[in-house]
Image (tube, rainbow, N blue to C red):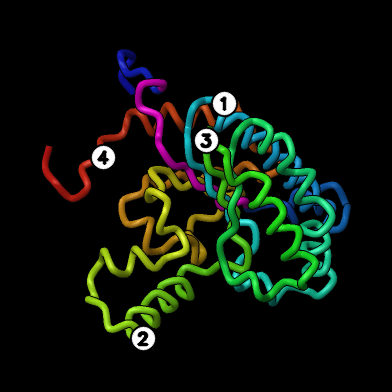
Amino acid sequence: MKSDISFKDRLPAHIAFIMDGNGRWAKKRMMPRNYGHRAGVAALKKLASDVFGLGIPYMTVYAFSTENKQRPKDEVDGLIKLLRDGMEELTEEIIAGGVRVCFIGDLSFFPSDVNEVLGRVERKSRDGKNGVLTIALNYGGRDEIARAAKSLAETGGPFDADSVGARLYTADLPDPDMIVRTGGEMRLSNFMLYQAAYSELFFVKTLWPDFGKKELLKLLKDYAGRNRRFGKVR
């Protein structure tokens, strides 16, 4: 990257994270997978503070996919318990910093008491003006697109890119400029398939609980040096 590029002048408006590696992080420590998920929550809390502290207004995280329901019952139950018991604590400081928190995905999968927690978090944060943290729960990109197409078919509206985009869970958000996947895998795993058309993709080996500000800044510098053409010639 050229030395005259200042990454602070070329920050993304929206950065999304595929938070991968919690289970492997726990296994390396000979602990159960849910121990890794709790560590992942702590990492998310700290990284959100770093992201919004840099002035990046939108952050989205892939917390629970539609496919994650197929994991062992004790792990799924543990993840649901984390939502029930930890979501308000996770978001307390974030909300205090003026950030709005919202949830996307098919939330009907979760028990009513979990949905009550999620609703309280959204209501507490609805006046936040300093950023938007979006947490994807029981979310799948294919399901999201199918849901939008079904809505269009039912309403008889024009079937074009703008109409589809307006019916996605993320209709009120800009598309992510950056998508970062931790844990070493190099795929999107059904995350923001429609929105990722021109996202800059970053794949890092660091497991999610170990991912922090130092590595974030390194990726932001890389992003600042990329030439984003959006299919055009420059």
Residue for point 68% across, 58% down: 119
Question: Cβ–Cβ below 8 Å for labels 2 and 4?
Answer: no
Q: Secondary structure at mark 2?
A: helix
Q: Is residue 125 above or below residue 157?
A: above
What residue does disc 4 label?
Answer: 228
Q: Residues within 10 Å of mark 2 (few under 14, many from 20)?
A: few
- Rendering coords of residue 60 (x, y %): 53, 49
Mark toward the start of the polypeptide (2 vs 4): 2
Mark toward the start of the polypeptide (1 vs 4): 1
* Residue type at numbered disc 4: Arg
Residue for point 52% across, 25% down: 54
Can residue 165 be found in the magenta stretch? no
Residue for point 40% across, 37% down: 13
Q: Secondary structure at mark 1?
A: helix
Location of residue 229 by image quarter: top left
What residue does disc 1 label?
Answer: 53
What residue does disc 3 label?
Answer: 129
* Residue type at numbered disc 2: Glu
- Rendering coords of residue 138 (x, y %): 62, 68
Q: Which residues are magenta?
A: 8-19
Mark toward the start of the polypeptide (1 vs 2): 1
* Residue type at numbered disc 1: Gly
